[in-house]
Amino acid sequence: MNDDQPYEFSTDPARIDAARVHDLISRHTYWAKDRPRHVMDAAIAGSRPYGVYRRSTGEQVGFARIVTDGATFAWLADVIVDPDLRGEGIGKLLVAGVVADVEPLGLRRILLATADAHGLYERYGWRPIGDDFTWMERPGTGTGPQAGSQDAPTDRAHGPGQDGPGANGPGQDAPRSDAPPTDAPHPGEPRADQGSAT
């Protein structure tokens, strides 16, 4: 973790600012506009939540969650970056951190749906599924938990290094991926000018 960077990634569920996440998701997405707070809270509680925070203030500026069985499959959802901070590498930091956190699970695949952030996700291993460029899949490293692996600790806070795939940099960096497959009619990712995603 590089303390010189203005933002840090964390896997610690205790750091999630549920009110801030709800505000971003319910106000800045087309697929989850006006989502009730209790629904967002339940989604966070039923997932592996992630955050990116401003080091100087602790303010949450990015969010994502993984829905998974912990052994074979995962769904990347509700990826959002504060609309006022896009272009600062927060999305890259977020996606790289999520990937690093779930890789030890040995999942067979991680799915997501996106309307406009394909380039970002391809950078971290996702590929389009068939002719529909909305759906993407990231093959995993195995078929289940690694031998001797432990359950996720209560505080998994960490951050990709400055020179690694999560380093801040130019280019598209505001990923937006959406809801579980039951919400399939919604592509799941707003345009960069639309704000967050669910």
Image (tube, grey):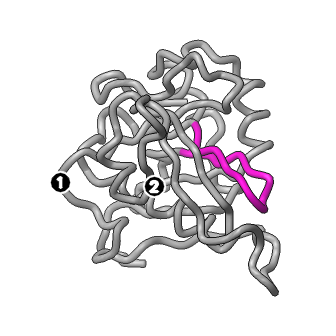
Farthest residue, direction left: 170
Q: Tell whether position 27 is magenta.
A: no
Badge 1 element: loop
Q: Which residue is mark 2?
A: 95
Q: Quadrant of the N terminus?
A: bottom left
Tell me if residue 143 comes above or below residue 191 in the rendering.
Answer: below
Q: Quadrant of residue 35?
A: top right
Is residue 37 rendered to the left or right of residue 159?
Answer: right
x, y percentage for residue 53? Answer: 47, 55
Image mark for residue 11? none
Percent from the top left, x then y, of residue 49?
65, 50
Work out whether 13 lies above or below 40. Answer: below
Q: Is residue 74 magenta?
A: yes
* Mark 1 surroundings: few (<14), some (14-19) or many (≥20) residues within 10 A: few
Which range of residues does the magenta coloring cover?
64-77
Amino acid carrying label 2: it is Val
What main secondary structure does the magenta stretch of the protein show? strand
Q: Which residue corresponds to the image point at 39% horizontal and 32% vertical from the top-left? A: 133
Q: Nearer the viewer, residue 142 or 22?
A: 142
